Amino acid sequence: MKLTKRQFNREFKLSVCEEIEQGLKTQAQASREYMIGTNLISQWISDYRKDPINCFQGSGVNKLNMDSQEIRIRELEIALGRATLENKLLKEANILLKKIQQRNKSFTK
């Protein structure tokens, strides 16, 4: 099974950086709590300190420049992709379960 890369939204990154900057948590504490590498948190802190207002804007699609139909299409395409992956996984699991059931039947005879 392929691991997917986690993506963190701007608000989450800002909240982690602000907790650290305000002294509420250390980088190590945040790393353990959110299960994020300390190197990634250090990079976020560095970006945050350079420009706290404009940091973490991302290079993705800007939804402000898209109309509501384009946004809805994009959301539906993402949902379809997830459903397709889930369907594939469930089919593979079903095949494995059938093989296990056949083995169990042959052992009981």
Image (spheres, rainbow, N blue to C red):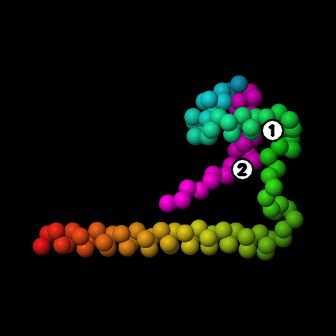
The residue shown at (84%, 68%) is 66
Residue 51 visible? The answer is yes
Alpha carbon of mark 1 to alpha carbon of mark 2: how far?
14 Å
Q: Residues within 10 Å of mark 2 (few under 14, many from 20)?
A: few
Under circle 2, the secondary element is: loop
Left or right position of 57 against 105: right
Residue 63 occupies which quadrant of the picture? bottom right
Residue 25 visible? The answer is no
Under circle 1, the secondary element is: helix
Q: Which mark is residue 32?
A: none
Q: Position of residue 49 (x, y in %)?
A: 83, 33
* Marks 1 and 2 in Cβ contact (< 8 Å): no
Callout 1 amino acid: Asp
The residue shown at (68%, 49%) is 8
In this orientation, which residue lies closer to the viewer: 55 or 68? 55
Left or right position of 103 against 90: left
What quarter of the picture does the C terminus occupy? bottom left
Which residue is identified by label 2? 9
Q: Position of residue 6 (x, y in %)?
A: 63, 52
Callout 2 amino acid: Asn
Which residue is identified by label 1? 47
The residue shown at (75%, 29%) is 21
Specify start and end residues of the magenta stretch as a single range.
1-22
Q: Is residue 56 above or below residue 48?
A: below
In reply to whether residue 40 is colored magenta, the answer given is no
Q: Position of residue 48 (x, y in %)?
A: 80, 37
In reply to whether residue 14 is colored magenta, the answer given is yes
In this orientation, which residue lies closer to the viewer: 51 or 71? 51
Q: Nearer the viewer, mark 1 or mark 2?
A: 1
Left or right position of 82 against 43: left
